[in-house]
Amino acid sequence: MPVQSLPVRDGSFHFRLLQQYLILLKKYPILTKSVTSGILSALGNLLSQYLEARKKAKHGGPVNEIDVAGATRYAIFGLIITGPVSHFFYQLMEVWMPTTDPFCIVKRLLLDRLIFAPGFLLLFYLVMNILEARGWEDFERKMKRSYWTALKMNWKVWTPFTFININFVPVQFRVLFANMIALFWYAYLATVRK
């Protein structure tokens, strides 16, 4: 009796999802990257909350409810800042440092790591402080307490991914690639900023 094999999963759904993303990316590049950034940033924050709750539960501590406002702040940051800023940064990088430049690999990495990363992290701290309705003193305190630590961790974690992203990922997918890594990065930042 012949046995019919069944696919493990329906690949057509994933294909249609990717196809729709590519259509939106072509028609509305900034909006698509911004919405994607907002969703993945919020998911990063929720991941952080989940990991913290799991850690507290493991040690017998009280587990807090999901902080929807926190996830919303990350979504807003991704939507308004990460998506558009990253889009224009990667586009400008292509113009400023074309692949025809023999030193473009090094120049791109240095630009991202020494200029963009510190500035973007500073912007993250500032915008989050505003979205949390905190004062200038709180901003200064968080900057003094955790900015340098977060920046060093950024350089350690992001440098290999950045190298791959700016040199091998097509420009239209760079924000998405960075957002996938940022999913975990935002989980780290949500924890370190507390």
Image (spheres, grey):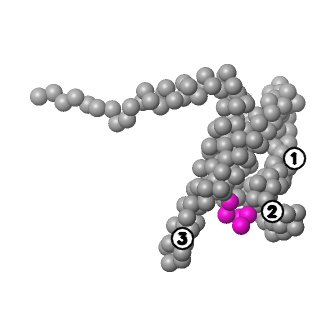
Label drawn at residue 94: none
Gap between marks 2 and 1, in whole Å? 26 Å
Q: Is residue 176 left or right of residue 105?
A: left
Q: Earlier in the sequence, mark 3 or mark 2?
A: 3
Q: Amino acid at mark 3?
A: Val
Residue span colored magenta: 190-194
Q: Is residue 55 left or right of residue 69?
A: left
Q: Secondary structure at mark 3?
A: loop
Q: Is residue 121 visible?
A: no
Residue 143 spot, x, y in % from top left: 84, 63
Q: Is residue 6 left or right of residue 77?
A: left
Q: Residue at x 67, y 21 (%)?
A: 27
Q: Amino acid at mark 1?
A: Ile
Task: Tell me where residue 89 sits by quadrant.
Answer: top right
Label drawn at residue 63: 3
Q: Secondary structure at mark 2?
A: loop
Magenta stretch: includes residue 102: no
